[in-house]
């Protein structure tokens, strides 16, 4: 058996997430811009979509990083200073995280911050985009990436005293298979079976080649929970998650606060041999209003917050006495069309609406001017997967060409919406009721309506309903966010899969060529080969016009300057981790400066 180490197999900074307000992502790999960027998100393919469209726009022109946004990303560096024990962090989150079951509940940024303080992954992403072992110590594959053998870390125990070993992974598997998120992750990873081939060894057998399998183990599939507790009381698990992580659940008061406290038996130490974590506790408080959350930080009610809103980042930049950690990556704002519903089943309509999307004006409405990079594809300009060809293929803002495309549909006696030739098309444009999102949708609505060809109805639903509408196909033109810095396959594969096989193919569109290209990308670990394959998918996206883009999502973690260790945390092997992608914080080495 020829064995490939994970670094060679996955030296790639990468892409997606899917739930609520899809997250964002940038990479540190070979770049197409001069930005210094931070690494990728740990969001899952079912974890980061939802209220997207929350970022800036793109008029399809030159996407080279403008000088005004060159400082959007914070470099990943190992922070200096004497680490000290003790102290409490109060973290203002953009929303409550209702579900804590990794096998069942979709998990966006608020959820990830809480959940992963208590639960850990088998693999984690490094600052260079490769994947390194966390609760694992090693992983290798056979020649064709269909069999992966993983060695687990010895000496790790769950919060309830149960040991972590190969049997843990075996016992987790049926629980994962029974849940919505777990089953989706298993399917996306191409996992056919697993077995304990030693006390601390697991062998995974895949149904088809998957060179990106370690990336799956950094997401839902590799999120370790105590299987006996999960099986005994699956509903109760969301109130008292049991993992191996640095913090243990202390109190959970939905819509008020969740408190986690230091795990006195945590297995990991810092490079000097000091047991981690440093903090005594973390209190997570949902503060949905963006202005209130920032004011809470400035007043000292919380000492830490995050945001995925460009306007909030703009306001925070103008405030004194706080430290900002900014990140912008592959996560692409905009929206999607439900192609199963007329008139969106006709590419003339979709392309016409895209041509009439004044994305630079959308950036401004979102407060993202000088913050958000314009998007033309699911990869930011500093990703190794970004290509100029895909950028050139994305339609530039051209109002007259958009009118011409939609007019051709309107005048067609065989138009799919059943209306008479010459009648206007109806478009329901929906987004969650965040003020910046409403402003952005009004910009789009004004241009579309201004064509004299489109009746636009604006609707707003809370984020949970917005996501549910997408999952249940109860949407038309639906704002959303796409992509992350995880492996591109995690984002792209569920969207290009046949709609009847993938709940995440929200546009309900199938392009056989894109599907086959995505399968080919899993049969190689060569970044250049994969880039060419993903480029062709991006070209198809531009041609099929099933999405519209605004821009890449800038995110922010803002803190009292005394809080340190957010940026330069390490994996157990001493390599630098991927920082704070999409406003997700790894709390293992966070400390409060005395």
Image: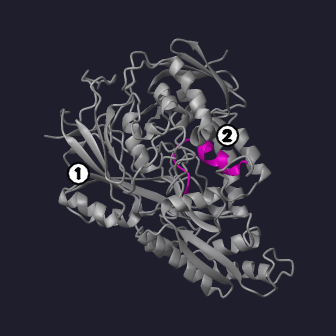
Q: Which residue is mark 2?
A: 529
Residue 212's place in the image compared with 201, above or below, is: below
Any part of residue 36 in sight: no
In terms of image quadrants, where is residue 394?
Answer: bottom right
What colour scheme has been applied to the protein in the rendered image? one colour
- Depth check, front residue: 61 or 79: 79
Q: Residue 387: x percent and y percent?
A: 61, 53
- Depth check, front residue: 423 or 496: 423
User: How many other residues sit within 10 Å of disc 1, few (<14), some (14-19) or many (≥20)?
Assistant: many
Q: Which residue is mark 1?
A: 303
What span is in magenta? 481-497
User: How many other residues sit within 10 Å of disc 2, few (<14), some (14-19) or many (≥20)?
Assistant: some
Q: Quadrant of the C terminus?
A: top left
Is the Cβ of the residue at disc 1 closer than 8 Å to that at disc 2? no
- Depth check, front residue: 453 or 372: 453
Q: Secondary structure at mark 2?
A: helix
| Residue drawn at 19 percent across, 36 percent down | 81
Q: Is residue 469 magenta?
A: no
Residue 502's place in the image compared with 242, above or below, is: below
């Amino acid at each position: 058996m020829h064995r490939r180490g994970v670094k060679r197999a996955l030296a790639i900074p990468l892409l997606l997430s899917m739930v609520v307000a899809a997250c964002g992502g940038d990479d540190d790999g070979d770049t197409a811009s001069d930005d210094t960027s931070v690494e990728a998100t740990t969001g899952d393919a079912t974890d980061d979509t939802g209220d997207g469209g929350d970022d800036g726009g793109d008029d399809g022109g030159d996407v080279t990083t403008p000088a005004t946004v060159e400082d959007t990303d914070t470099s990943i560096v190992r922070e200096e200073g004497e680490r000290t024990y003790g102290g409490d962090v109060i973290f203002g989150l953009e929303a409550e995280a209702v579900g804590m079951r990794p096998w069942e509940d979709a998990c966006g940024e608020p959820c990830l911050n809480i959940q992963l303080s208590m639960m850990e992954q088998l693999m984690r992403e490094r600052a260079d985009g490769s994947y390194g072992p966390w609760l694992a110590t090693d992983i290798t594959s056979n020649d064709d990436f269909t069999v992966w053998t993983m060695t687990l870390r010895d000496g790790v125990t769950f919060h309830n005293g149960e040991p972590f070993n190969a049997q843990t992974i075996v016992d987790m598997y049926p629980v994962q298979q029974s849940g919505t998120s777990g089953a989706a992750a298993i399917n996306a990873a191409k996992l056919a079976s697993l077995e304990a081939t030693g006390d601390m060894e697991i062998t995974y057998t895949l149904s088809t080649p998957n060179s990106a399998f370690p990336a799956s183990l950094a997401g839902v599939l590799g999120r370790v929970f105590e299987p006996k507790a999960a099986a005994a009381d699956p509903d109760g698990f969301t109130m008292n998650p049991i993992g191996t992580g640095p913090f243990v659940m202390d109190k959970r008061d939905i819509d008020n606060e969740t408190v986690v406290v230091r795990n006195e038996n945590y297995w990991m130490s810092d490079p000097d041999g000091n047991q981690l974590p440093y903090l005594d506790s973390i209190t997570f408080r949902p503060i949905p209003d963006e202005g209130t959350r920032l004011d809470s930080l400035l007043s000292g009610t919380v000492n830490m917050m995050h945001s995925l809103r460009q306007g909030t980042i703009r306001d925070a930049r103008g405030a004194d006495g706080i430290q900002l950690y900014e990140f912008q990556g592959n996560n692409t704002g905009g929206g999607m069309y439900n192609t199963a519903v007329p008139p969106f089943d006709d590419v003339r309509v979709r392309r016409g609406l895209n041509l009439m999307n004044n994305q630079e004006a959308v950036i401004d409405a979102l407060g993202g001017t000088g913050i958000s990079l314009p998007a033309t594809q699911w990869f930011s300009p500093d990703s190794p997967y970004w290509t100029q060809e895909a950028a050139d293929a994305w339609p530039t803002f051209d109002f007259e060409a958009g009118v011409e495309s939609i007019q051709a549909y309107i005048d067609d006696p065989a138009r799919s919406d059943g209306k008479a030739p010459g009648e206007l098309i109806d478009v329901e444009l929906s987004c969650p009721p965040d003020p910046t999102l409403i402003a952005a949708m009004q910009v789009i609505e004004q241009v579309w309506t201004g064509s004299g060809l489109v009746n636009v109805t604006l609707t707003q639903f809370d984020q949970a309903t917005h996501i549910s509408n997408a999952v249940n196909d109860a949407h038309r033109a639906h704002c959303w966010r796409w992509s992350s810095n995880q492996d591109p396959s995690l984002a792209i594969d569920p969207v290009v899969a046949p709609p009847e096989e993938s709940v995440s193919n929200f546009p309900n569109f199938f392009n056989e060529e894109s599907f086959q290209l995505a399968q080919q990308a899993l049969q190689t670990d060569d970044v250049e080969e994969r880039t060419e394959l993903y480029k062709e998918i991006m070209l198809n996206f531009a041609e099929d016009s099933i999405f519209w883009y605004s821009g890449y999502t800038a995110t922010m973690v803002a803190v009292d300057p005394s809080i340190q260790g957010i940026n330069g945390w390490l994996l157990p092997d001493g390599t630098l981790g991927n920082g704070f992608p999409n406003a997700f914080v790894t709390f293992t080495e966070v400390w409060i400066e005395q």
